[in-house]
Amino acid sequence: MKKIYFLFFSLISLISFGQNLAANGSFESWTAGAPDSWTTLDFNTTDLTENTNATYVSDGTSSASVNVLTQTQGDTDMRQTVSLIGGVTYTMSLDVYATNNEARARIFNGNGFSPSEYSDETVLNQWQTISFEYTPASNEDFEFGIRFYDINSNWTGGSLFYIDNLQIVAAVDPSVAITSPTDGATVPSSDVDVEISVQNFNVASGGAGDGYIVYTVDGGAAIDKFDSTPISLSSLADGSHTVALELVDNSGASLPNPATASVTFDVTTIAQVSNITALRAGTTGEFYELTGEAVISYIVTEGTRNQKYIQDGDAGILIDDTAGTLSTSFNIGDGITGLKGQLTEYAGTLQFVPSENVASASSTGNVLTPIVVSAADLITNGETYESRLITLNNVTFEDTGVFADNTNYNVADGSDVTVCRVAFGDEDIIGTAIPTTASSITGLGGEFNGTYQIFPRYASDIAAPLSVNGFNASKFSLFPNPTNTGFVNIASNNDGDMSVEAYDILGKRVKYQTLTNNTSLNVSDLKSGVYILKITQNNATTTKKLVIK
């Protein structure tokens, strides 16, 4: 059998490699008609079968026969996950045997599809090997993927492939890599630890090992380093810096196959802001520390971005944490103080990307009270409510049926029409009935390219309108306001006891009291500041701002 090798022969002449990390890469082991150790198999057991015909086997005694009958490329995946070591170069390869030119095979990194390599659709009825090199910056679980792509101009109904001999092998020559910071990163500190990964080389002093590390900072004098602990740099000026290093033998000479690494990063000063309002007024791309406390209003459990909505007394913002920097386990209602990160923006929504972990919650069990807004408020003042917990009152859905994930629904209050977007696909709102009468919607204020929206989270967020009959704000009084007398009078035109709850700017309930009509609320025990009063009477509820001097 003839094989055409792309890149692989030239690579193997320069670098020696270790054992194959792929599980069942030669498709020798099958159970119930499916190859073992593959965590994702989009094919059924009639289109993905074991082959033992030696003509179509490149390694061992069997291969996988893959019958591609769809042009929907995302439905043709085969994947498995392997653990890789940061700084080590891996060669990943697959043998492919195509029987026609209607499609081609691709191997790729499942996280972002880069790097990747396609088979040559003109090479038919013979084996070809496709491969690429990959060097992870740090230890990672790598999802190796195989996918099949139709060639639309050639497609007539299907394409039969044989695949075999998946190889994921690490180079065993000495290597060195800088695993942190990454190249091009912005570091919000003048003190930087440059973390190093050394493989297949014993770094030691006095000739006790294979040699040592030589490094430079910004092209300065060479410095010898006799271990692989981080290089700690301090008092770096704002701006760009480059660290370059090399493995050398005990005489200080370069290795036969030189092992080098370098990184260029930017250092920037981190600014402090006391609240989210000041943070939102910052410059995107810059780094900030939020010194005041913010409370988590919602944690997105769908997807891999580790997103959290936080708010304080005046504003909210979305934490977007793809890297998982906030590794501490937080809950809804937890307070976070000292959050550091970078201000970014996506589709008009301000986001905060953490640059450091926060060790623990600064408070727990906080209860946030939504701000009641009208459709007109959300349309005209949506930036004020972005990423805050709000209630959109007395609106009617223009659609019928049931709620679906990632779907926009127009909601109207008279002539004012805004958007309710169902954005959290793993919550119980999915599949529930869309109301056919006026409703209140509680959720998070959102934006997509200038269109302001509300994101309900749960089925319970869609409820009957907040009642205003006989309890209209125009028939309701709160005085004196502001007050410095230690009390505030609460009166309405209705009969019946009133339930009064007071919340501070962080949403913590600080007072609860039942009052008879036209009586006073004692606030002498509350500090100066702004509070939200939630007043309920005869099953009707309203909120008012109270200022205590």
Image (cartoon, rainbow, N blue to C red):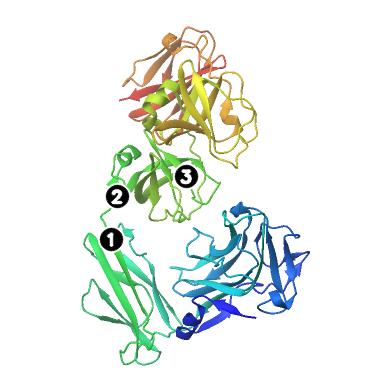
In the drawing, what numbered circle is on residue 8?
none
Q: Which residue is mark 2?
A: 286
Question: Marks 2 and 3: which is nearer the front?
Answer: 2
Mark 2 and 1 residues: CB-CB less than 8 Å, in contact? no
Q: Which residue is mark 1?
A: 266
- In the image, 226 versus 547, the foreground residue is 226
Q: Evaluate whether residue 352 shows in this view.
A: yes
x, y (%) of residue 457?
55, 36
In the drawing, what numbered circle is on residue 308?
3
- Residue 435 is left or right of residue 306, and the answer is right
| Residues packed near mark 3 inside 10 Å, few (<14), some (14 to 19) or many (20 plus) | many
- In the image, 180 versus 412, the foreground residue is 412
| Secondary structure found at label 3 | strand
Give the residue displayed 34% in from the left and 69% down from the top. 194
x, y (%) of residue 134?
47, 70
Quadrant position of the C terminus in the picture: top left
Looking at the image, tell me whether mark 2 or mark 3 is earlier in sequence order: 2
